[in-house]
Image (cartoon, rainbow, N blue to C red):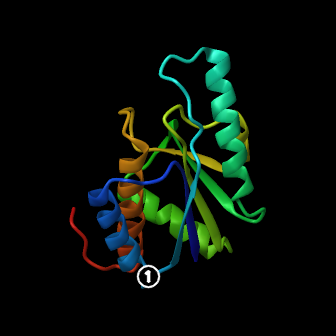
């Protein structure tokens, strides 16, 4: 299984990097993990709706350029489907069982994902209605992927 996480923006916070690195290391026993960061589009605080659309489009183009045509794409989106850890594990297991070897998770920038990225996605996943910084979301996602593999393998994990 090849898992890629595509994120907008460079991760700067050391404590988040350390947490992500730890889970990526642990995941090495189960899957190949690749992390891809695309540049975020610089924009002032007060953007018009048209300017927000331009920023999301430019970031979306960068994201789409990093997605392999054969990949099963899961976009993180606040309006996506919510799953428990056990449901996520079962879903990943199902994807692997039926021949999906490339899964790409996409985390957008501070304005979210452009519609073209959402259209390319095979599905949308939500971790709830709360807004989280996209850098923190990456740590949460990597932990949940790791937890999913522990569940799939019947290994203990914290409930």
Q: Locate the C terminus by quadrant.
A: bottom left
Between residue 96 and residue 32, name the one nearer to us.
Answer: 32
**Residue beneath the point at 37% across and 52% down:** 84
Q: Is residue 80 visible?
A: yes
Measured as percent of width and height from the top left, residue 143 is found at 35, 63
Q: Is residue 84 left or right of residue 70?
A: left
Q: Position of residue 24 (x, y in %)?
A: 40, 73
- Displayed quadrant of residue 128: top left
Asked whether, in this view, residue 126 is left or right of residue 132, the answer is right
Q: Quadrant of the N terminus?
A: bottom right
Residue at 66% in and 25% down: 53
Q: Residue furthest bottom?
A: 29
Instruction: Count the labels in the image.
Output: 1
User: Relative to the observer, which residue lies in front, 78 or 7?
Assistant: 7
Q: Is residue 25 above or below residue 143?
A: below
- Relative to 39, does residue 57 appear above or below in the rendering? above
Classify 10 Å Cα crowding around label 1: few (below 14), some (14-19), many (20 and above).
Answer: few
Give the residue furthest to the right. Answer: 69
13 or 108: nearer the viewer? 13
What kind of element bears circle 1?
loop
Percent of width and height locating residue 55 = 64, 31
Residue at the disc numbered 1: 28
């Amino acid at each position: 299984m090849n898992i890629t996480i595509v994120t907008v923006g460079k991760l700067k916070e050391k404590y988040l990097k350390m947490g992500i690195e730890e889970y990526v290391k642990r995941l090495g026993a189960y899957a190949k993990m690749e992390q891809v960061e695309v540049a975020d589009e610089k924009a002032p605080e007060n953007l018009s709706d048209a300017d927000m659309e331009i920023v999301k489009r430019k970031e979306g183009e960068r994201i789409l350029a990093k997605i392999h045509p054969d990949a099963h794409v899961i976009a993180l989106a606040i309006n996506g489907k919510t799953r428990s850890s056990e449901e996520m594990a079962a879903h990943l297991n199902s994807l692997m069982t039926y021949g999906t070897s490339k899964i790409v998770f996409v985390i957008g920038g501070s304005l979210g994902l452009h519609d073209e990225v959402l259209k390319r996605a095979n599905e949308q996943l939500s971790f709830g209605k709360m807004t989280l910084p996209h850098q923190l979301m990456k740590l949460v996602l990597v932990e949940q992927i790791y937890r999913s593999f522990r569940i799939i393998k019947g290994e203990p994990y914290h409930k």
